[in-house]
Image (spheres, helix red, strand yellow):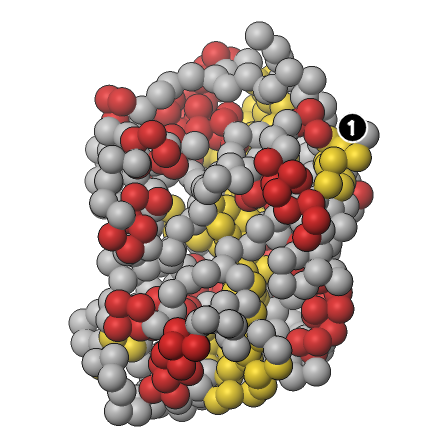
Amino acid sequence: MPCEDPKRNSQLSRFMNFYRERHCPLPDEMPLCLIPPPLGYKIPIQWPESLHKVWHSNMPHNKIATRKGHQGWMKEEGPYFIFPGDGTMFPDGALPYIDKLRRFMPIKGGIIRTALDMGCGVASLGGSLLAEGILTLSFAPRDSHKAQIQFALKRGIPAFVLMFGTRRLPFPAFAFDFIHCSRCLIPFAAYNATYFIEVDRLLRPDGFLVISGPPVQWPKKEKEWEELQAVARALCYELIIVEGNTVIWKKPDRDPCLNPNEFRIGLCDESDDPNVAWYANLKRCMTPSFINRGYAIGEIPGWPERLLRAPSRALIMNNGIDLFQADTRRWATRVAYYKNKLKVKLGTPAIRNVMEMNAFFGVFAAALETDPVGVMNVVPARKPLTLDIIYDRGLIGVYHDWCEPFSAYPRTYDLIHVASIDSLTKLPGSRNSSCSLVDLMAEIDRMLRPEGRAVIQDSPEVIKKVARIAHVLRWVTTINNKEPESHGRGKILVATKTFWHL
């Protein structure tokens, strides 16, 4: 992961873990190379069996199994790593832990759909919540375990590498129905409660915040626990329950409520856009929830109704509702064309981890909802910031600038999809490129597993360039016309990454 290099980052400031955030090489220092699979690599175990075991040879990193095996994170068993589903704060397994939460939260019924698991380990909670209809985006930093997010992704659980440091997390405001921390060790009350304020930006009104582990009623952490409760009171969070080392709060659903407090928390200026979150510094102010309305839990439809209903935040765009509905219909037809005519194996166990590189309204992911896939929707940071609409639909994703490498390990995705690939290299409102199509294609190759598929749409001229680069990448390609219902002149390149060895 070029932007997660511990050797380079170790020279940077330790303040607020700045050195553990993304720091990319300069353009002329960026590697341009193909990454071979490890010795003994095998085509991944298919979903849903992969949730419980993966090939040891695909990620021969034993450190987590050695250090955390007694806590049930994962264990080595023959040619596999297996995942019992336990965790540091739920040693009896994620399912009993979820049963504990459901006594105080509406886990079933579609009220809670999008969740964020901070410091997720191998993402056993996110994997277990899938059975409840809750879609969890799990993150953890690159740390001494080296591969916890890689294991999560190999299991088929949506995850990526991320550090809670000096910057906003790359998500829109009011995105998550439920935010969870199980021994994530984030100092929520530190730096004038900056980290708690960022969680508040991300949580929907009426959403739930669950923290398990230190400092909640933890020995020798009494001061930190008092400070954490004081921050929650300052932001008017409703205390639902404190049980053992777990606390559950509910965010208020009303205009900004801010009690007098010792943390000097104020309201953000009206000029602050709470959806701007790509390399944006953390703010020590509270985002007013009345900026937009219609996105609180109870105001948006439950799942799955919310998937196809245009959310109120689409109204901010010109003709947003009409565009949303037309795009949804168009992509339902296009995905059927992919499956039936282009023979892309969507809807089969061969494809689980999917990335949509230019997601806009999340229409590609919405068209795949009945398929057994997990889609990472990426909204380019230089394009219209529509990621809030994707979350309102009950889908998940991140902001990213495709002139930089993504924070995921090699060989992560079974299928990568992108429409208008050339636009991802352009400066906003300009024909000038800010990065190379060759670099972008090499990054796609890095993220794609052997025998994985890439589906790329663009003009015939761009697809011709893409095909030439794909040949150098050792991809096997076909170039196809768009679906008959489309009147554009675009072409579709379908590629398979070959399984090559040094």
From the top left corner, tell me how far across and down residue 487 is, in percent: 51, 42
Neighbour class for label 1 at 10 Å: few (<14), some, many (≥20)? Answer: few
Depicted 243 relative to depicted 461: above or below: below
Taking the image as shown, residue 42 lies to the left or right of residue 464, namely right
Which image quadrant is residue 36 in? top right
Q: Secondary structure at mark 1?
A: loop
Of 184 and 444, nearer the camera is 184
Taking the image as shown, residue 335 lies to the left or right of residue 18, namely right
Residue furthest front in the image: 220
**Which residue: 65% across, 84% down?**
104
From the top left corner, tell me how far across and down residue 134 is, in percent: 65, 65
Instruction: Judge whether residue 494 can be spotted in this image.
Output: no
**Which residue: 51% across, 72% down?**
219
Depicted 188 relative to depicted 350: above or below: below
Of 417 and 271, nearer the camera is 271
Of 473 and 54, nearer the camera is 54
Depicted 295 relative to depicted 257: above or below: above
Q: The C terminus appears in which quarter of the rendering?
A: top right
Which image quadrant is residue 414 in? top right
Q: Give the labeled residue for mark 1.
A: 79
Q: Amino acid at mark 1?
A: Pro
**Which residue: 81% across, 30% down?**
78
**Which residue: 38% across, 69% down?**
188
Q: The N terminus appears in which quarter of the rendering?
A: top left
From the top left corner, tell me how far across and down residue 51 is, in percent: 73, 47
Of 115 and 428, nearer the camera is 115
